[in-house]
Image (tube, rainbow, N blue to C red):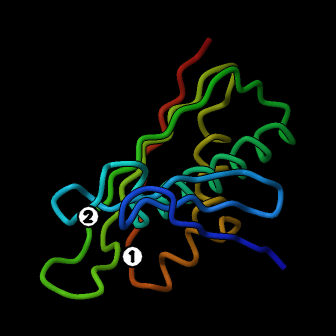
Amino acid sequence: MSKIELSRVKGDFGFEATDEHGHILRMDSSPESGGWDFGVRPMQTLLMGLGGCSAIDVIAILKKQRQVVSDYKMIINGEREKGVEPSLWKDINIEFHLYGQIDEDKAAKAVELSVNKYCSVAATLKKAGATIKWKVFVHQA
């Protein structure tokens, strides 16, 4: 079981969440809604989690296939539902940028496996109604 402890540390909405290993994530609301821009918005942490979850999958799959990943970058754009509360993620678009000696077909398959089979964050977002689309860019070293 995972344990997260949340403490208010700045203004009304500035929080620090700490996991059982002592890792800290700062969260806050926007200044327009009373926050101090102290940290990441809670909904953006979901997109960050999607990126981290999928990145771990993709790199692990490619390492098993003896592909050399020298660098890795993702760009994640999300659009939330308009005019409803709660406003969930509706459309998510991801660019996977992989650098190194990587077969493009293997990279595409690794991403597909991550988003559609292995990444628990992607599965959670999809069950909440989000559509996740992606493009893979392999940059040879």
Q: Is residue 113 above or below residue 6?
A: above
View extreme (left): residue: 83
Please provide percent x and percent y for residue 48. 51, 53
Residue at x 62% of width, y 11% of height: 141
Q: Which mark is residue 79?
A: 2
| Residue of label 1 | 130
State the residue in front, 9 or 124: 9
Q: Dot 1: what SS?
A: loop
Q: Nearer the viewer, residue 19 or 116?
A: 19
* Outermost residue to the top: 141
Q: Which mark, residue 4?
A: none
Query: Which residue is drawn at the image coordinates 39% and 48% (left, top)?
Result: 38
Q: Nearer the viewer, residue 4 or 140?
A: 4
Quadrant position of residue 50 = bottom right
For residue 122, say whether it is visible: yes
Q: Residues within 10 Å of mark 1 (few under 14, many from 20)?
A: many
Distance from disc 1 to disc 2, alpha carbons, whole Å, reads 9 Å
Residue type at tag 1? Ala
Left or right of 121 on screen, residue 86? left
